[in-house]
Image (cartoon, coloured by chain):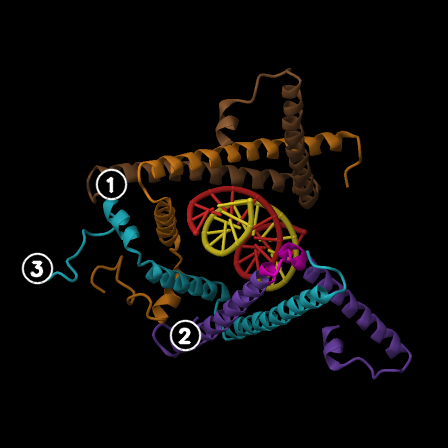
Chain colours: A purple, B cyan, C brown, D orange, E yellow, F red
DNA sequence: AACGTTGAAATAGTTC
DNA sequence: GAACTATTTCAACGTT
C-alpha cells in the first residue's frame, strides 16, 4: 500500500500520465479512422458495408493465423521447423 | 454506386487499407496501455482505482470545457451557480 | 430568453425534474429487463439468441405495420375507409 | 439445452413476452421524455442546454457516490485532494 | 431529407 | 464462469 505524499505518489503519477498519454494517442487514431470513414462516405461508399468488410477481413485473418499455427504444428512434427520456442513451452 | 472491378474498387481498397492500418496502430496502443497497467499492478497498485482516477481526471477536464455562457445562465437560474459575478465591470 | 432567478428558473426547474423523474423510471425498467435476461440465462437459455429473437419479432412487427398502412391505402382507394386524416393532407 | 415444443418453449415464450412488455413501457417513457423536451422548447428553452444540465446533475450525483476510501488515498497521493482531515478525531 | 452528432444497447474482452 | 469494463455498433435526434 503506497504511503501518501511520498515516493509512491510520484510513481502513481508517472503511471497515470503514461496511460493518459497513450490514451490520447489512441483517441487521435480513433478520430483519424472516423475521418477516413467520413471521406469514404463523401465518395459515395456505404460505411456500414465497409465496416462489415473490415470485420470479415479481420476474421479471415484470425482464421488464417489459426491455420498458420496448426500448419506450424504439422511442420514441426515433420522436422521442417525448429522445436517450439520457449514461450510456448512456458505456457504449457 | 461504384462500378465493380473499375477504379472504384481501387478506391474502396485504399479506404479499407487505410482504416486497417490505423486500427492496427490503435490495437498496439491498447496493448501498451495494458502493459502499463500490468506494470503498475506489479508494483502493488490497484488498477481498478487507477482506472477510476483516470476517469475522474478526464471528467474534470470535460468540466473545464463547459464554458458556454447559456449553460451558465441556465445553471444560475437553477441556483447551481452563484449570481453572475462582475468579472469585467469593476464595481457594478 | 429566461430571466435569471425569476419565474423562468422555476419553469426550467420543473421541466428538468419532470425529465429526471421519467429517466429514473426508464432506468428502473432497463434494470428489470436485465434481470429477466439474467433469470433466463440462469435457466439455461442463451441470452444472445433471445435478443436476436426479440429483434426479429420487432422487425416483423414493423413490417406488419408498414403492410398495414399500405393496406389502408388500398382500402381507402376502394372507399372502404374514410379519406386520409387532415394530418396527412397538411403534410402535403 | 431446451427441448423444442415442450415446456421449455413455454418458458422461453414467457421470458420473451416479459421483456417485450418492459421494453414497450420503456419506449413509452422515452416518448414522454421527448414530449417534455418539446414542451420546454415551445416555451423558449434551449433543449440542448437542458440536456447538458441534466448530464451535469447526474454527474454530480455520481461524484457523491465516489466515497471509496482507497480511491481517496490514491487521490490524496496525487494531490487531487487535501490531506486527510481529522473527521472523527477531534483535534488530531 | 440527409447529415452529423449524441446517447443507448450489445458484444467482446479481461479479471477474479 | 461470472461480473465488470471497454469498445463498438446501432438508432434517434436535431439541424441545415
Query: Can you say whether C10 is above or below B26 in the image?
Result: above
Look at the magenta stretch and give its main secondary structure.
Answer: helix
The image quadrant where one finds the N terminus of chain C is top left
Dot 3: within a 10 Å radius of its alpha carbon, few (fewer than 14), some, or many (20 or more) residues?
Answer: few
Residue extent of the magenta highlight: A40-52
Judge left or right: residue B16 versus residue B30: right
Query: Which residue is situated farthest in the bottom direction here?
Result: A82
Q: Residue at x 70, y 60 (%)?
A: A53
| Helix, strand or loop for disc 2 | helix
Query: Can you say whether C76 is above or below E12 in the image?
Result: above
Residue C47, horizontal then vertical, whole percent: 67, 43
Pick the residue in front: C26 or B50.
C26
**Numbered tag placed on residue B91 in the rendering:** 3
| Helix, strand or loop for disc 1 | helix
Q: CA distance from mark 3 to mark 1?
A: 26 Å
The residue tagged 2 is A13
Amino acid at each position: 500500500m503506497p504511503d501518501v505524499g511520498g515516493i509512491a505518489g510520484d510513481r502513481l503519477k508517472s503511471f497515470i500520465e503514461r496511460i493518459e498519454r497513450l490514451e490520447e494517442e489512441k483517441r487521435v487514431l480513433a478520430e483519424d479512422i472516423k475521418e477516413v470513414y467520413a471521406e469514404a462516405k463523401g465518395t459515395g461508399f456505404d460505411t456500414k458495408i465497409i465496416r462489415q468488410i473490415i470485420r470479415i477481413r479481420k476474421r479471415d485473418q484470425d482464421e488464417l493465423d489459426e491455420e498458420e499455427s496448426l500448419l506450424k504444428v504439422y511442420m514441426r512434427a515433420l522436422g521442417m521447423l525448429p522445436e517450439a520456442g520457449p514461450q510456448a513451452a512456458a505456457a504449457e
